[in-house]
Image: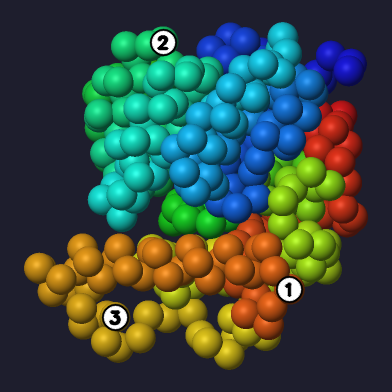
Amino acid sequence: MDSCPIRKDRNMAVKLTELLKIKHPIIQAPMFLVSNTAMVKEAMKCGIAGCIPALNYRTLEELRMALKELKADKVEGGAFGFNLIVNKSNIKYKGQLEVVCEEGCDFIITSLGSPEDTINQAHKVGIKVFCDVVDLQFAKKVEGLGADAIIAVNNEAGGHRGNISPKDLITELTTNCRIPIISAGGVGTKADIDKMLSYGAAGVSVGSPFIASVEANVTNEYKQACVDYGAKDIVMTERISGTPCTVINTPYVQKVGTKATWIESVLNKHKKLKKWVKMIRFAKGMRDTQKAANEVTYKTVWVAGPSIEHTREILPVKAIVKKLIH
């Protein structure tokens, strides 16, 4: 592959490529049910990093096998990592962290909770930790805990997004934090990457454009939806994990609505019950999303971000990466 034409005149941009020893400052973002080893292998061949949610594997042994597979097929100029949901809704978290640390990878991305234990355990075995944040307050917390980089989740991200625009969030974090800031959300073209780097980002995390990849383990209906729908069709829903999440506004989503039911709203305010309500909602939402991603069903709950606006056809990962860097 030709050398990347992305600007590298900023120190922050150089730091991500040096941090992960990759050719281009891009992470193929971890996507629930979508990301897999085939996608990450292709990403590494293209000189970028790839990441998979640990929750994509039903058992710890399956997770262990995925780690072994990626280690065996790792290529120079690429990197791979795993995403951990680090709050109490993920009852598998402790076991997943243990397996990842035992087998090893280049980096871990933490989401939806305190990364303190992850950072402590991962650093013992030489694994870097990047932490999802949506504002400066949490960014300063994870920096203080020893995070190696910050994933700045803005209001154009897919899935669990933030509330601040890419420019404002990147500017605020780069001004106040000393570690690299990786922008997540709103990237579907090379021009988008150049824009994020111009704001001061060290690199970008790109997810939704890879849903419509040949290698993705989802139905062709889900992939084609990313081709057929656009940015205007993305809506926020509270009906999946209990945390607002972006989905494609299919007829089924329109039918069931995007707001929590009144009983869910009441229970979520109950001090003793809200933790259990959230865990039940998370489990049910994940099952519904899995069915929509892996089966042809009328219950089409497809997670995606507005950057599907630039998805015109289903392509191999290497073709998608080429579009992003050239």
Q: Nearer the viewer, residue 58 or 234?
A: 58
- Report crowding for label 3: few under 14, some 14 to 19, many 20 or more residues within 10 A (C-alpha): some
- Residue displayed at 67% across by 16% down: 72
Q: Which residue position is annotated with label 3?
A: 264
- Quadrant assignment, res 36: top right
- In the rendering, which numbered label is found on residue 126? 2
Tell me the element at label 1: loop
Distance between the alpha carbons at the discs numbered 3 and 1 = 28 Å
Dot 1 amino acid type? Val
Q: Which residue position is annotated with label 1?
A: 296
Q: Is residue 75 left or right of residue 125?
A: right
Q: Nearer the viewer, residue 186 or 112?
A: 112
Examine the rendered structure and indicate whether residue 279 appears above or below residue 269.
above
- The mark closer to the camera, 1 or 2, is 1
How many marks on residues? 3
User: Do tag 3 and tag 1 residues touch (Cβ < 8 Å)?
Assistant: no
Tell me the element at label 2: loop
Distance between the alpha carbons at the discs numbered 1 and 2 = 42 Å
